Image: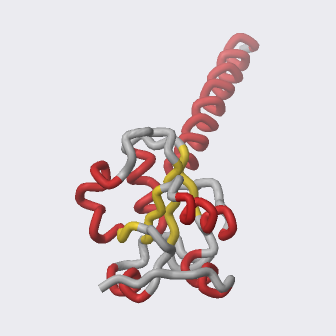
Amino acid sequence: MVGLTLKNSDMMKKFLALLATVLVAASAFAGEFPDISIAEVKALSESKKATIIDVNGTDSYKKNHVPGALNFDSIQANLAKSLPADKNAEIIAYCGSPKCKAYQEAANAAHKLGYKNVKHMSAGISGWVSAGMKTESAK
């Protein structure tokens, strides 16, 4: 009976280790990306050292977006062609506000293409505008 208990204990440890691995993998896949501040995005926008993706939809994009940002609606089907060849390049996705999770579609798509430096401007366009940052509009 002691051998059976030890065997069950070993199986439980293996099961818990497997469960922990699955949970870690699931949380990584869930699309949690590091946050980047408005000030950092402003500097990257001005220097053109990052690819910035607006996921607010074409109507919102036309009204205002971060200068230099790409309209995800327009590039989604051929995202790989719109992103730099360097998989370590900085990719920033944003949506409407801190509570919005729409950015994850673009961030996850970039991550799936192999980009390793994908970030999220959680303030969104509403935070950008509230901070008094310059925007662009499109026709």
Q: x, y (%) of residue 94?
A: 52, 69
From this view, report whether residue 120 is shown above or below residue 134.
above
User: In this view, which residue lies farthest toward the right?
Assistant: 2
Q: Considering the image in quadrants, where does the N terminus appear? A: top right
Q: Considering the image in quadrants, where does the C terminus appear? A: bottom left
Left or right position of 111 against 82: right
Q: Nearer the viewer, residue 19 or 125?
A: 125
Q: What residue is at 47 percent from the left and 78 percent from the top?
A: 65
Q: Nearer the viewer, residue 56 or 104?
A: 56
Left or right position of 91 against 138: right
Q: Which image quadrant is residue 114 in?
A: top left
Q: What residue is at 65 percent from the left and 33 percent from the top?
A: 16
Q: Nearer the viewer, residue 119 or 133?
A: 133
User: In this view, which residue lies farthest toward the front?
Assistant: 47
From this view, report whether residue 64 is shown above or below residue 68.
below
Q: Nearer the viewer, residue 12 or 79?
A: 79
Left or right position of 5 against 78: right
Q: Which image quadrant is residue 53 in?
A: bottom left
Is residue 30 in view from this perspective? no
Q: x, y (%) of residue 104?
A: 47, 62
Q: x, y (%) of residue 132?
A: 65, 85
Q: What residue is at 65 percent from the left and 87 percent from the top?
A: 130
Q: Which image quadrant is residue 62 in?
A: bottom left
